[in-house]
Amino acid sequence: MKAAIALASIAIATVVVPAQKFSVSVEGVRVDVLVTDGRRPVAGLGVADFELRDSGVLQHIDSVALEDVPLSVMLVLDTSASVAGQPLVDLKRAASAVVRLLAKSDRAALMTFWASVTLASGWTGDRAQLERAIAKVGTGGFTALHDAAYAGLTLRDNGAGRTLVVIFSDGQDTASWLPGQTVIDIARRNDAVVYAVGLLPLAGARLPGYRLDFWSGIQFPVPKASAGTLMESFLDALAEDTGGQFINAERSDRLRDTFVRIVNESRSRYLLTYSPQGVDAGGWHPIEVTVKGRKLKIKARRGYLR
Amino acid sequence: MQMACRRLRRSVVAFSCATFLYVPVCAAQGAAADDLLRRYRALVDAYAEHDKSAVRELLQWNDKQIVTVLTRLDTPGDPLRPWSARRYKAAIMLHTDAALQLFDANEETMQHQLDAAVALAARAQQNDAGDVGEFASRWSIAVSRLLRDRLRPRTAERFLGEIRKALPDDAGVLFESGTLAEELATAYAFEIDLAMTDAMRRRTVETIVERVLQRRKERLETAARWLEEALAVQATESARLHLGRVRMLLGEDAEALRVFGNLESSEDPGVAYLAPLFTAAVHERQGHLDEAAAAYGRAHARYPRGHSAVIGLSAVQQRTGKGDASRESLQSLLAQPAEPDDPWWWYQYDPAGAADQRVDAIRQEARR
């Protein structure tokens, strides 16, 4: 569909005619990449170290940034009834720890959800405002995880920095209107990285099937999806597709350390920028990132959708 | 004679608690059964008089004793016959409260207590015991809602299966059965059952997916059947709305759109909101995003505090490249000062505490 592009980070320099190939540099695409050697992030890499393929076509990387990129953290916190009590206390501590980690140029926003989604604090660098918003958080009833994830991605910071969306939930969706697949599709049009934090017993009560979720009945045909993909759980899939990670904290007293680890890890990520060449303008663009000549673990979004 | 009595006793105990047909007993057993019946009636009367020990005492009874009583109660062999509507109601709630005491302790015994209550409702129907039929209808829906609220949908399904035998043409019970089947097909689509476990044991993801889809279709067809039967007895907008959604989930889009279209002018604000909301879902799935956006707009106009219509509209706007409009829609929703509310949240579940209140109201009625 014409102009069906909602990637806030893409600067459109000229009108792109769908179904044509990018023959000149018309749009910049940003890819947030984590490079690790074992569990240790790898620093000191530059443009010449990376190889990036868009739809299988090798691309010229315009820039690689690591430290000087402001961070925008959207905290999307499940405050449904099951979080009441000590988990809520621990969750607030974890959120406050994130606020204390913000650098001068960083910003954060706070969204809470049960059945309804609330923007408790809009984007700001004012730590006191964020702390006040965290202190006011209370609990409600059902869990609208999909709707909240959607709202968190849609209201991402439109500033120049990188956006990290941290979604915390302790259970299954019980109230959303949007099916998980819609949120995954929206995430693919968005360059925010999602880290999802669960609070589930080790045995794992997570139900599979974000593409098969039948809650609201808006199911999309997914003809080429493998059965394995159909069974992926929502938070796993959302994090994987955006280059983030799903982490099960298991216990609420571990939330603070988990949140701190996520923010620190996001500061070790490289931000690669390139202008697509020789690929179709629309549709799904699978991305593959490697580091030349080294066997390192790369975590990046699976691709992007236009 | 003794041998015959033992055989009979075994057959009665092994008998399904759900039916409790009248079985003639020998004289020796008859005297003991009459004594049990008297003790049972005293328990029921104590319960009706708010005696808290009645439930506790009933829980001391074994299945055999309960079966013996219910087999004779209000039959030609019952010396205490007839049982009044008031007593039937109290007895039904006595067993219900006993079942609730066993909620987290013993599922099987809990089901036996519910079976006993169903058997009483059936016996009351057989004997035309006043307004017990109407009471039993509301009671069974309240119990089903409580079981669903406590995440026991399969227990609710089994319970409704039994009550349908006692109240086969009850519109409320049929509607409850239909909405439960709809819930099982959606919210419980991934519930692990034996067939799923078998597929997982064989580690075939394809088999699991196929099983999920097949079971969902079966449950939806069951839901459609119960809702159609409910509508045949009593045509309500709620039943039409649920049947329309089940048709939508079965992929019968034209029929679903026709049903929703007729309901958009409903005077019930919840129905008038959900009908265009579901219409939007059909259009979205078909890829008709402009029609979907229009339907979301109609839903929002009819229930401005509803979250789902705005979130649905925002997502459609984003998919059609209207990113700014999408953000504005969402921001306007999140800036709403009013307490959020959305009929979609209560489409399948009661608000917190409502299920308990419903049962409590029935309890009060049984103890009048």
Image (cartoon, coloured by chain):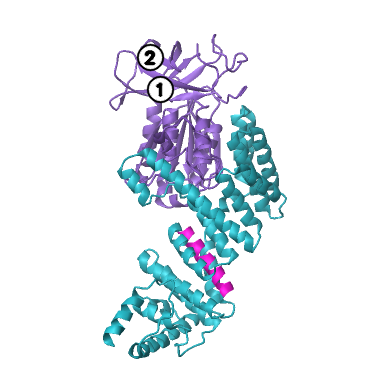
Chain colours: A purple, B cyan
Residue A80 showing in the rendered view: no
Q: Residue at x 52, y 33 (%)?
A: A153
Determine the image quadrant of residue A169. top left
Check disc 1 and give the amino acid type: Val
* Residue A185 located within the stretch drawn in magenta: no
Magenta segment: B133-150
Q: Residue at x 56, y 50 (%)?
A: B345
The reply to whether discs 2 and 1 touch (Cβ–Cβ < 8 Å) is: yes
Q: Nearer the viewer, residue B6 or B144?
A: B6
Determine the image quadrant of residue A43. top left
Residue with the mark numbered 2: A50
Q: Nearer the viewer, residue A300 or A67?
A: A300
Q: Chain of mark 2?
A: A
Near mark 1 (Cα within 10 A), the count class, few <14, some 14-19 or many ≥20, is many
Disc 1 is placed on an element classified as strand
Q: Are marks 2 and 1 on the same chain?
A: yes
Residue A200 image position (x, y, % from top left): 37, 45
Residue A44 showing in the rendered view: yes
Q: Is the magenta region chiefly helix, strand or loop?
A: helix
> Image height check: is B47 above or below A297?
below
Residue A125 image position (x, y, % from top left): 51, 31
Q: Residue at x 59, y 77 (%)?
A: B131
Residue A99 image position (x, y, % from top left): 45, 35
Residue with the mark numbered 1: A33
Residue B231 relative to residue B144: left or right: right
* Residue B140 located within the stretch drawn in magenta: yes
Determine the image quadrant of residue B298. top right
Q: Chain of mark 1?
A: A
